[in-house]
Amino acid sequence: MRWENLTVESGGHSRAADAALFGADAVVSRTFDTPEFRGITFHEVRARSIVNRVPGASRMPFEWTVNPYRGCSHACVYCFARKTHTYLDLDSGLDFDSQIVVKVNAPEVLRRQLGSRRWQGEHIAMGTNVDCYQRAEGRYRLMPGILSALRDHANPYSILTKGTLILRDLDLIVQAAQVTDVGISVSVGFTDPELWRTVEPGTPAPERRLEVVRAFTDHGIGCGVLMAPVLPFLSDHPGQLRATVRAIAASGATSVTPLVLHLRPGAREWFMAWLAQRHPHLVARYERLYADGAYAPKWYQRRITRQVHELAQEYGIGPARAGMPRRIREPEPVETAVSEPTQLSLI
């Protein structure tokens, strides 16, 4: 695998002028013969940097990220980050799901970088590439150290997750909320149990993720839901949208933000292979819908956003302002206007 070519530039190919993120001599590969980790190989590396700048051309609504893992055992068939595994000479399919890179020194490297005179205390987003609360976190426990460093430096941050393990760190998040801006979002694109089992096989069930929302709400921390992805012809029926928004509202979510599936190279091939196996009658429809690129047509995005926002208003929740971290000690005003969707590459 090409460890030496990884750079601190998030999500892009390496360049000769960039410093390597970690060297090949620092890699230790391990397997664990336990049911939750069977079939997964962990590649432990010592990172040289952990705070990554998002490329300027990105659609991300933030500039800095921290990603303690690469690859993800959630195994979501649509995951946009699958392409990044090919930079390691791994494939974007099964390897992405089962060959997990673990930056074992992430907490101490982050603490050092936050303490640098060059660091200006900008917002840091986590869970934007792969989930920082995937199963590996239960063993490696990198996030408590990361959250402690952010708290101690009063550095604003946000977390997006499908993992219920975030509840383990609830106290650390509450402590950080007393000194800085913290934003928590949980990803729940649909509540259909059969669809969940086949599309997101390594994740906690949608209802368990919504229990996370309720737990944060009960502790006085507003938690939004990223309703993503909405899967064309699979989870976009009006009845399905209503059931999902109703469940989100019942969880006490402060906002719901719908995002339609996007299919970048790497993810597109893996998803379409899954679709051909599970729903072959939809292959041609997807090919037409995504004929112009990774994103569904604007008219389709607008339709889904309008439907979800109308349902959210009906159930008493409002759409989040895309990309804006919330100050959780002072609730944001609810927006009622229907706005054009913003495609964020978060899932």
Image (spheres, helix red, strand yellow):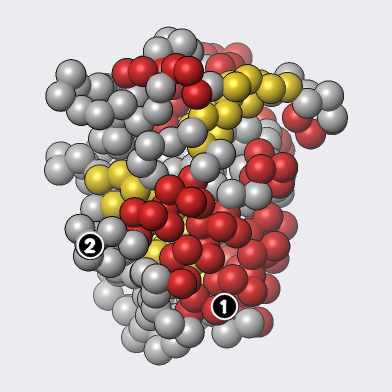
Residue plotted at (34% across, 54% down): 113
* Left/right of residue 124 with respect to residue 18 in the rendered view: right
Tag 2's secondary structure? loop
Q: Position of residue 184 (x, y in %)?
A: 49, 66
Does residue 261 appear anywhere in the picture?
no
Amino acid identity at mark 1:
Val
Q: Position of residue 19 (x, y in %)?
A: 25, 29
Q: Position of residue 319 (x, y in %)?
A: 37, 69
Which residue does the numbered mark 1 point to in the structure image?
174
Tag 1's secondary structure? helix
Which residue does the numbered mark 2 point to in the structure image?
117
Q: Position of residue 167 (x, y in %)?
A: 67, 64
Label 2 to label 1: alpha-carbon separation: 27 Å
* Left/right of residue 49 with respect to residue 95 in the rendered view: left
- 290 to 118, vertically: above or below: above
Q: Residue furthest bottom?
A: 330
Does residue 332 appear anywhere in the picture?
yes
Amino acid identity at mark 2:
Arg
* Left/right of residue 56 with respect to residue 288 in the rendered view: left
- 311 to 64, vertically: above or below: below
Front residue of 290/6: it is: 6
Front residue of 258/120: it is: 120
- 278 to 202, vertically: above or below: above
